[in-house]
Amino acid sequence: MNGEQQVVRWRILFVDDEPHVLKGLERLLHPMRREWDMLFAEGGAQALEKMNAQPVDIIVTDLWMPGMDGAQLLAEVKRRFPRMIRVVLSGQVERETALRSVELTHQFIAKPCEAQTLIGMISRSIALHRILEDESLKQMISGMEALPTLPSLYLDIMKEIQSENGSLARIGQIIATDIGMSAKILQLVNSAFFGLPNAMANPAQAAIYLGLDTIRALVLSVHIFSRFAEGRLAGIGLDALWRHSMTVATSAKEIVALEGGGQAAMDFAFVAGLLHDVGKIVLAVNLPDRYQRVAEAAEKLKLSDVEAERRIFSVTHAEIGAYLLGIWGLQDPLVEAVCFHHNPDASPNLAFSPLMAVHVANSCYSEALVGGTVANCTKLDINYLNKIGRGERLPVWFEACRTIAQKGGSDGGKNSVR
Protein backbone atom coordinates (compact mmCIF):
# COMPACT_ATOMS: atom_id res chain seq x y z
CA MET A 1 0.00 0.00 0.00
CA ASN A 2 3.12 2.24 0.03
CA GLY A 3 2.19 3.57 3.46
CA GLU A 4 -1.12 4.99 2.19
CA GLN A 5 -4.16 4.61 4.39
CA GLN A 6 -6.83 2.40 2.91
CA VAL A 7 -10.06 4.25 2.19
CA VAL A 8 -13.09 2.54 3.70
CA ARG A 9 -16.04 2.63 1.31
CA TRP A 10 -19.50 2.32 2.76
CA ARG A 11 -21.84 -0.20 1.21
CA ILE A 12 -25.48 0.85 0.87
CA LEU A 13 -28.25 -1.53 -0.21
CA PHE A 14 -31.40 -0.13 -1.84
CA VAL A 15 -34.48 -2.35 -1.91
CA ASP A 16 -37.67 -1.94 -3.94
CA ASP A 17 -39.94 -4.33 -5.79
CA GLU A 18 -40.14 -2.06 -8.85
CA PRO A 19 -37.10 -2.23 -11.17
CA HIS A 20 -37.73 1.24 -12.60
CA VAL A 21 -37.53 2.72 -9.08
CA LEU A 22 -34.16 1.04 -8.52
CA LYS A 23 -32.94 2.30 -11.90
CA GLY A 24 -34.09 5.78 -10.93
CA LEU A 25 -32.17 5.58 -7.65
CA GLU A 26 -29.08 4.39 -9.48
CA ARG A 27 -29.26 7.40 -11.82
CA LEU A 28 -30.05 9.77 -8.95
CA LEU A 29 -27.03 8.63 -6.95
CA HIS A 30 -24.64 8.20 -9.87
CA PRO A 31 -22.41 11.11 -8.66
CA MET A 32 -21.70 9.18 -5.44
CA ARG A 33 -20.41 6.00 -7.10
CA ARG A 34 -16.79 6.94 -6.38
CA GLU A 35 -17.50 7.28 -2.66
CA TRP A 36 -20.01 4.51 -1.95
CA ASP A 37 -20.51 0.91 -3.03
CA MET A 38 -24.19 0.71 -3.95
CA LEU A 39 -26.21 -2.48 -4.28
CA PHE A 40 -29.77 -2.81 -5.58
CA ALA A 41 -32.22 -5.59 -4.77
CA GLU A 42 -35.69 -6.34 -6.16
CA GLY A 43 -37.59 -7.28 -3.03
CA GLY A 44 -36.81 -8.63 0.42
CA ALA A 45 -35.65 -12.13 -0.53
CA GLN A 46 -33.02 -10.82 -2.94
CA ALA A 47 -31.94 -8.23 -0.37
CA LEU A 48 -31.29 -10.92 2.25
CA GLU A 49 -29.27 -12.91 -0.28
CA LYS A 50 -27.07 -9.90 -0.97
CA MET A 51 -26.60 -9.16 2.75
CA ASN A 52 -25.66 -12.78 3.43
CA ALA A 53 -23.07 -12.62 0.65
CA GLN A 54 -21.32 -9.42 1.76
CA PRO A 55 -21.46 -6.93 4.64
CA VAL A 56 -23.77 -3.93 4.25
CA ASP A 57 -23.64 -0.73 6.33
CA ILE A 58 -26.99 0.92 5.48
CA ILE A 59 -30.20 -0.52 4.10
CA VAL A 60 -32.73 1.77 2.40
CA THR A 61 -35.98 -0.02 1.66
CA ASP A 62 -39.50 0.56 0.47
CA LEU A 63 -42.27 -0.57 2.84
CA TRP A 64 -45.02 -1.56 0.43
CA MET A 65 -43.73 -4.66 -1.38
CA PRO A 66 -45.47 -7.95 -2.26
CA GLY A 67 -44.37 -11.10 -0.51
CA MET A 68 -41.95 -9.91 2.16
CA ASP A 69 -42.87 -6.31 2.88
CA GLY A 70 -40.46 -3.69 4.18
CA ALA A 71 -41.42 -4.18 7.82
CA GLN A 72 -40.78 -7.93 7.62
CA LEU A 73 -37.46 -7.30 5.89
CA LEU A 74 -36.36 -4.77 8.50
CA ALA A 75 -37.28 -7.18 11.29
CA GLU A 76 -34.99 -9.77 9.72
CA VAL A 77 -32.23 -7.22 9.22
CA LYS A 78 -32.48 -6.14 12.83
CA ARG A 79 -32.25 -9.76 13.99
CA ARG A 80 -29.44 -10.89 11.68
CA PHE A 81 -27.44 -7.68 11.17
CA PRO A 82 -28.05 -5.52 14.26
CA ARG A 83 -25.32 -2.94 13.56
CA MET A 84 -26.83 -1.96 10.20
CA ILE A 85 -28.52 1.45 9.92
CA ARG A 86 -32.11 0.91 8.77
CA VAL A 87 -33.86 3.52 6.61
CA VAL A 88 -37.29 3.48 4.98
CA LEU A 89 -37.77 5.24 1.63
CA SER A 90 -41.44 4.90 0.88
CA GLY A 91 -44.55 6.63 -0.31
CA GLN A 92 -47.88 6.68 1.51
CA VAL A 93 -48.43 3.59 3.62
CA GLU A 94 -51.32 2.38 5.73
CA ARG A 95 -51.28 3.54 9.34
CA GLU A 96 -50.94 -0.04 10.63
CA THR A 97 -47.91 -0.70 8.43
CA ALA A 98 -46.32 2.58 9.44
CA LEU A 99 -46.79 1.90 13.15
CA ARG A 100 -45.47 -1.64 12.73
CA SER A 101 -42.31 -0.19 11.20
CA VAL A 102 -41.65 2.45 13.85
CA GLU A 103 -39.66 0.20 16.16
CA LEU A 104 -37.66 -1.24 13.25
CA THR A 105 -36.64 1.97 11.50
CA HIS A 106 -33.95 4.48 12.38
CA GLN A 107 -35.09 7.03 9.79
CA PHE A 108 -37.92 7.45 7.29
CA ILE A 109 -37.75 9.40 4.03
CA ALA A 110 -40.81 10.03 1.88
CA LYS A 111 -41.04 9.34 -1.85
CA PRO A 112 -40.47 11.17 -4.04
CA CYS A 113 -37.34 12.76 -2.60
CA GLU A 114 -34.63 15.01 -3.92
CA ALA A 115 -31.18 13.58 -4.53
CA GLN A 116 -29.65 15.88 -1.92
CA THR A 117 -32.11 14.69 0.73
CA LEU A 118 -31.08 11.08 0.29
CA ILE A 119 -27.38 11.87 -0.15
CA GLY A 120 -27.48 14.12 2.90
CA MET A 121 -29.03 11.43 5.09
CA ILE A 122 -26.49 8.80 4.02
CA SER A 123 -23.55 11.20 4.32
CA ARG A 124 -24.68 12.18 7.80
CA SER A 125 -24.82 8.51 8.83
CA ILE A 126 -21.30 7.98 7.52
CA ALA A 127 -20.08 11.04 9.43
CA LEU A 128 -21.58 9.58 12.62
CA HIS A 129 -19.51 6.45 12.01
CA ARG A 130 -16.39 8.50 12.73
CA ILE A 131 -17.73 9.53 16.15
CA LEU A 132 -17.79 5.95 17.36
CA GLU A 133 -15.23 3.35 16.31
CA ASP A 134 -16.20 0.41 18.55
CA GLU A 135 -18.28 -1.95 16.40
CA SER A 136 -19.81 -3.73 19.39
CA LEU A 137 -21.09 -0.43 20.76
CA LYS A 138 -22.51 0.50 17.34
CA GLN A 139 -24.34 -2.81 17.22
CA MET A 140 -25.74 -2.27 20.70
CA ILE A 141 -26.93 1.25 19.94
CA SER A 142 -28.40 0.36 16.55
CA GLY A 143 -30.55 -2.27 18.25
CA MET A 144 -32.12 0.16 20.72
CA GLU A 145 -35.80 0.84 20.11
CA ALA A 146 -36.42 3.14 23.07
CA LEU A 147 -34.76 4.71 26.09
CA PRO A 148 -36.09 3.82 29.54
CA THR A 149 -38.30 6.36 31.23
CA LEU A 150 -38.27 7.60 34.81
CA PRO A 151 -40.72 5.28 36.64
CA SER A 152 -42.91 8.03 38.08
CA LEU A 153 -43.25 9.74 34.69
CA TYR A 154 -43.94 6.43 32.97
CA LEU A 155 -46.81 5.78 35.37
CA ASP A 156 -48.10 9.33 34.85
CA ILE A 157 -48.21 9.02 31.08
CA MET A 158 -49.73 5.53 31.13
CA LYS A 159 -52.48 6.79 33.44
CA GLU A 160 -53.15 9.79 31.19
CA ILE A 161 -53.14 7.74 27.98
CA GLN A 162 -55.44 5.04 29.35
CA SER A 163 -57.90 7.55 30.75
CA GLU A 164 -61.09 8.20 28.77
CA ASN A 165 -60.54 11.90 29.46
CA GLY A 166 -56.80 11.92 28.77
CA SER A 167 -55.36 15.38 28.23
CA LEU A 168 -53.06 15.79 25.24
CA ALA A 169 -51.60 18.93 26.80
CA ARG A 170 -50.76 17.02 29.99
CA ILE A 171 -49.25 14.17 27.96
CA GLY A 172 -47.06 16.69 26.18
CA GLN A 173 -45.91 18.17 29.50
CA ILE A 174 -44.93 14.73 30.79
CA ILE A 175 -43.02 13.85 27.62
CA ALA A 176 -41.17 17.18 27.69
CA THR A 177 -39.74 16.45 31.14
CA ASP A 178 -38.38 12.97 30.38
CA ILE A 179 -35.14 12.17 28.57
CA GLY A 180 -36.22 8.91 26.94
CA MET A 181 -39.71 10.01 25.92
CA SER A 182 -38.47 13.33 24.48
CA ALA A 183 -35.81 11.64 22.35
CA LYS A 184 -38.23 9.06 20.97
CA ILE A 185 -41.11 11.41 20.25
CA LEU A 186 -38.79 13.81 18.39
CA GLN A 187 -37.40 10.93 16.34
CA LEU A 188 -40.90 9.99 15.29
CA VAL A 189 -42.46 13.39 14.71
CA ASN A 190 -39.54 14.50 12.52
CA SER A 191 -39.69 11.40 10.36
CA ALA A 192 -41.67 11.39 7.15
CA PHE A 193 -44.06 8.89 8.74
CA PHE A 194 -46.03 11.87 9.99
CA GLY A 195 -45.46 14.42 7.23
CA LEU A 196 -44.32 17.37 9.32
CA PRO A 197 -43.46 20.25 6.94
CA ASN A 198 -40.71 21.68 9.19
CA ALA A 199 -38.38 20.11 11.75
CA MET A 200 -39.62 20.31 15.34
CA ALA A 201 -37.54 20.49 18.54
CA ASN A 202 -40.37 20.86 21.05
CA PRO A 203 -41.54 17.53 22.55
CA ALA A 204 -44.76 18.97 24.00
CA GLN A 205 -45.76 20.43 20.63
CA ALA A 206 -44.75 17.15 18.97
CA ALA A 207 -47.24 15.26 21.12
CA ILE A 208 -50.01 17.71 20.25
CA TYR A 209 -49.15 17.46 16.56
CA LEU A 210 -49.33 13.65 16.59
CA GLY A 211 -52.67 13.65 18.41
CA LEU A 212 -54.07 11.52 21.19
CA ASP A 213 -55.05 8.50 19.06
CA THR A 214 -51.58 8.20 17.51
CA ILE A 215 -49.85 8.68 20.87
CA ARG A 216 -52.06 5.99 22.40
CA ALA A 217 -51.28 3.58 19.56
CA LEU A 218 -47.55 4.26 19.76
CA VAL A 219 -47.41 3.78 23.52
CA LEU A 220 -49.88 0.95 24.05
CA SER A 221 -49.36 -1.09 20.85
CA VAL A 222 -45.85 -0.27 19.63
CA HIS A 223 -44.44 0.34 23.14
CA ILE A 224 -42.22 3.24 22.15
CA PHE A 225 -41.68 4.05 25.84
CA SER A 226 -40.34 1.69 28.48
CA ARG A 227 -39.74 2.11 32.19
CA PHE A 228 -36.61 1.59 34.24
CA ALA A 229 -36.79 -1.63 36.22
CA GLU A 230 -34.87 -0.16 39.14
CA GLY A 231 -34.59 3.20 40.86
CA ARG A 232 -30.82 3.08 40.57
CA LEU A 233 -28.87 1.53 37.73
CA ALA A 234 -25.14 0.91 37.35
CA GLY A 235 -23.96 3.82 39.43
CA ILE A 236 -26.56 6.25 38.09
CA GLY A 237 -29.06 7.78 40.47
CA LEU A 238 -32.05 8.23 38.18
CA ASP A 239 -33.63 11.01 40.20
CA ALA A 240 -30.30 12.85 40.37
CA LEU A 241 -29.77 12.43 36.63
CA TRP A 242 -33.29 13.72 35.94
CA ARG A 243 -32.78 16.78 38.19
CA HIS A 244 -29.40 17.51 36.61
CA SER A 245 -30.77 17.17 33.06
CA MET A 246 -33.80 19.36 33.77
CA THR A 247 -31.63 22.02 35.43
CA VAL A 248 -29.18 22.06 32.52
CA ALA A 249 -32.08 22.17 30.04
CA THR A 250 -33.83 25.06 31.78
CA SER A 251 -30.54 26.94 32.25
CA ALA A 252 -29.51 26.45 28.61
CA LYS A 253 -32.87 27.78 27.47
CA GLU A 254 -32.50 30.83 29.72
CA ILE A 255 -29.00 31.53 28.39
CA VAL A 256 -30.38 31.58 24.84
CA ALA A 257 -33.20 33.87 25.98
CA LEU A 258 -30.67 36.26 27.56
CA GLU A 259 -28.90 36.44 24.21
CA GLY A 260 -32.10 37.35 22.38
CA GLY A 261 -32.76 33.96 20.83
CA GLY A 262 -36.20 33.20 19.48
CA GLN A 263 -38.56 30.44 20.59
CA ALA A 264 -37.12 27.87 18.18
CA ALA A 265 -33.59 28.51 19.45
CA MET A 266 -34.79 28.22 23.05
CA ASP A 267 -36.54 24.93 22.25
CA PHE A 268 -33.37 23.52 20.72
CA ALA A 269 -31.33 24.59 23.76
CA PHE A 270 -33.83 23.07 26.19
CA VAL A 271 -34.01 19.71 24.42
CA ALA A 272 -30.23 19.60 23.92
CA GLY A 273 -29.81 20.17 27.64
CA LEU A 274 -32.39 17.53 28.50
CA LEU A 275 -30.66 14.96 26.26
CA HIS A 276 -27.00 15.88 26.86
CA ASP A 277 -26.37 12.88 29.17
CA VAL A 278 -28.48 10.39 27.24
CA GLY A 279 -25.33 8.34 26.56
CA LYS A 280 -25.06 7.56 30.28
CA ILE A 281 -28.47 5.89 30.13
CA VAL A 282 -27.48 3.92 27.02
CA LEU A 283 -24.36 2.54 28.73
CA ALA A 284 -25.98 1.92 32.10
CA VAL A 285 -28.94 0.05 30.59
CA ASN A 286 -26.99 -2.09 28.14
CA LEU A 287 -23.64 -2.58 29.88
CA PRO A 288 -24.43 -2.25 33.59
CA ASP A 289 -21.43 -4.20 34.89
CA ARG A 290 -18.92 -2.23 32.84
CA TYR A 291 -20.62 1.06 33.60
CA GLN A 292 -20.52 0.28 37.31
CA ARG A 293 -16.72 0.16 36.89
CA VAL A 294 -16.88 3.77 35.64
CA ALA A 295 -18.33 4.93 38.95
CA GLU A 296 -15.79 2.85 40.85
CA ALA A 297 -12.85 4.17 38.81
CA ALA A 298 -14.04 7.76 39.19
CA GLU A 299 -14.25 7.42 42.97
CA LYS A 300 -11.06 5.42 43.48
CA LEU A 301 -8.82 7.33 41.08
CA LYS A 302 -10.43 10.76 41.57
CA LEU A 303 -11.39 10.99 37.91
CA SER A 304 -14.24 12.83 36.26
CA ASP A 305 -17.02 10.69 34.77
CA VAL A 306 -15.71 11.50 31.30
CA GLU A 307 -12.15 10.44 32.16
CA ALA A 308 -13.37 7.23 33.78
CA GLU A 309 -15.60 6.41 30.80
CA ARG A 310 -12.74 6.86 28.39
CA ARG A 311 -10.59 4.57 30.52
CA ILE A 312 -13.24 1.82 30.60
CA PHE A 313 -14.87 2.20 27.16
CA SER A 314 -12.33 4.24 25.14
CA VAL A 315 -15.25 6.56 24.44
CA THR A 316 -17.52 8.81 26.53
CA HIS A 317 -21.24 9.13 27.07
CA ALA A 318 -21.16 12.23 24.86
CA GLU A 319 -20.16 10.30 21.72
CA ILE A 320 -22.49 7.43 22.60
CA GLY A 321 -25.46 9.79 22.96
CA ALA A 322 -24.62 11.67 19.78
CA TYR A 323 -24.41 8.44 17.79
CA LEU A 324 -27.83 7.28 19.01
CA LEU A 325 -29.56 10.61 18.35
CA GLY A 326 -27.81 10.89 14.99
CA ILE A 327 -28.95 7.53 13.64
CA TRP A 328 -32.42 8.33 14.99
CA GLY A 329 -32.38 11.34 12.69
CA LEU A 330 -32.56 14.12 15.28
CA GLN A 331 -31.46 17.53 14.10
CA ASP A 332 -27.77 18.42 13.76
CA PRO A 333 -27.79 21.15 16.48
CA LEU A 334 -29.00 18.59 19.01
CA VAL A 335 -26.48 15.94 17.96
CA GLU A 336 -23.67 18.51 17.99
CA ALA A 337 -24.61 19.79 21.46
CA VAL A 338 -24.69 16.27 22.90
CA CYS A 339 -21.44 15.23 21.21
CA PHE A 340 -19.33 18.23 22.26
CA HIS A 341 -20.93 19.45 25.49
CA HIS A 342 -17.73 18.69 27.42
CA ASN A 343 -15.31 19.91 24.76
CA PRO A 344 -16.96 22.54 22.53
CA ASP A 345 -13.62 23.54 21.06
CA ALA A 346 -13.59 20.21 19.18
CA SER A 347 -16.64 21.38 17.25
CA PRO A 348 -16.18 23.38 14.03
CA ASN A 349 -19.09 25.61 15.10
CA LEU A 350 -17.84 29.09 16.02
CA ALA A 351 -21.26 30.68 16.46
CA PHE A 352 -23.45 30.96 19.53
CA SER A 353 -25.53 27.78 19.49
CA PRO A 354 -27.30 25.21 21.68
CA LEU A 355 -23.88 23.60 22.12
CA MET A 356 -22.51 26.69 23.83
CA ALA A 357 -25.57 27.12 26.03
CA VAL A 358 -25.52 23.47 27.13
CA HIS A 359 -21.76 23.54 27.74
CA VAL A 360 -22.07 26.55 30.03
CA ALA A 361 -25.16 25.23 31.84
CA ASN A 362 -23.59 21.81 32.39
CA SER A 363 -20.18 23.13 33.40
CA CYS A 364 -21.69 25.58 35.90
CA TYR A 365 -24.16 23.10 37.37
CA SER A 366 -22.26 21.99 40.49
CA GLU A 367 -21.15 25.49 41.49
CA ALA A 368 -24.55 26.99 40.72
CA LEU A 369 -26.24 24.33 42.85
CA VAL A 370 -24.23 25.22 45.97
CA GLY A 371 -24.30 28.97 45.39
CA GLY A 372 -20.64 29.07 44.39
CA THR A 373 -18.86 31.41 42.01
CA VAL A 374 -18.18 31.31 38.30
CA ALA A 375 -14.44 31.36 39.01
CA ASN A 376 -14.75 27.83 40.42
CA CYS A 377 -16.36 26.41 37.29
CA THR A 378 -13.19 24.60 36.22
CA LYS A 379 -14.90 22.59 33.47
CA LEU A 380 -15.72 25.70 31.44
CA ASP A 381 -13.86 26.16 28.17
CA ILE A 382 -13.09 29.86 28.56
CA ASN A 383 -10.96 29.89 25.41
CA TYR A 384 -13.93 28.75 23.34
CA LEU A 385 -16.17 31.36 24.92
CA ASN A 386 -13.67 34.05 24.03
CA LYS A 387 -13.19 32.62 20.54
CA ILE A 388 -16.86 33.12 19.76
CA GLY A 389 -16.83 36.54 21.38
CA ARG A 390 -19.07 35.76 24.36
CA GLY A 391 -16.60 35.51 27.25
CA GLU A 392 -17.79 38.74 28.86
CA ARG A 393 -21.35 37.34 29.10
CA LEU A 394 -20.35 34.49 31.39
CA PRO A 395 -21.12 36.25 34.73
CA VAL A 396 -24.66 37.02 33.53
CA TRP A 397 -25.19 33.44 32.40
CA PHE A 398 -23.84 32.04 35.65
CA GLU A 399 -26.23 34.11 37.73
CA ALA A 400 -29.12 32.75 35.67
CA CYS A 401 -27.85 29.19 36.15
CA ARG A 402 -27.50 29.73 39.91
CA THR A 403 -31.04 31.08 40.23
CA ILE A 404 -32.50 28.15 38.32
CA ALA A 405 -30.42 25.52 40.17
CA GLN A 406 -31.40 26.85 43.58
CA LYS A 407 -35.07 26.84 42.60
CA GLY A 408 -34.82 23.16 41.80
CA GLY A 409 -33.96 23.31 38.12
CA SER A 410 -37.44 23.31 36.61
CA ASP A 411 -41.02 24.36 37.03
CA GLY A 412 -42.43 20.86 36.95
CA GLY A 413 -42.59 20.89 33.18
CA LYS A 414 -45.33 23.51 32.95
CA ASN A 415 -43.24 26.14 31.26
CA SER A 416 -39.98 24.33 30.52
CA VAL A 417 -40.81 23.99 26.84
CA ARG A 418 -43.39 26.31 25.31
Image: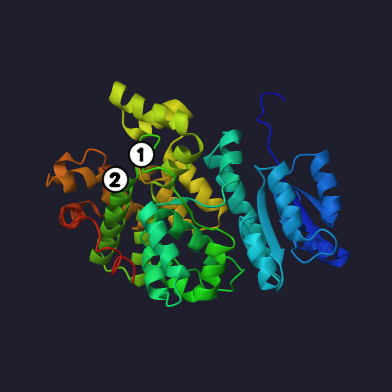
Q: Amino acid at mark 1?
A: Ile
Neighbour class for label 2 at 10 Å: few (<14), some, many (≥20)?
A: few
Which residue is at a point 27% across and 69% down the rendered structure image? 260
Q: Position of residue 390 (x, y in %)?
A: 25, 55
Q: Which mark is residue 262?
A: none
Most foreground residue, 344 or 320? 320
Q: Is residue 114 visible?
A: no
Q: Do the residues bearing badges 2 and 1 touch, measured as CB atoms within 8 Å?
A: yes
Q: Which secondary structure lies at badge 2?
A: helix
Image-quadrant location for residue 231: top left
The answer to whether residue 107 is above or below residue 276 is: below
The Cα atoms of the two marked residues, 2 and 1, are separated by 8 Å
Left or right: 132 with respect to 316?
right
Q: Amino acid at mark 2?
A: Ala
Which residue is at a point 62% across and 68% down the rendered structure image? 193
Most foreground residue, 6 or 141? 141
Left or right: 54 with respect to 152?
right
Q: Is residue 54 visible?
A: yes
| Residue at the far bottom in the pictured view | 165
Q: Quadrant of the N terminus?
A: top right
Neighbour class for label 1 at 10 Å: few (<14), some, many (≥20)?
A: some
Residue that badge 1 annotates? 236
Q: How is the image coloured?
A: rainbow
Image-quadrant location for residue 340: top left
Q: Quadrant of the C terminus?
A: bottom left
Q: Position of residue 41 (x, y in %)?
A: 84, 54
Q: Position of residue 253 (x, y in %)?
A: 29, 62
Q: Which secondary structure lies at badge 1?
A: strand
Residue that badge 2 annotates? 240
Most foreground residue, 90 or 235? 235
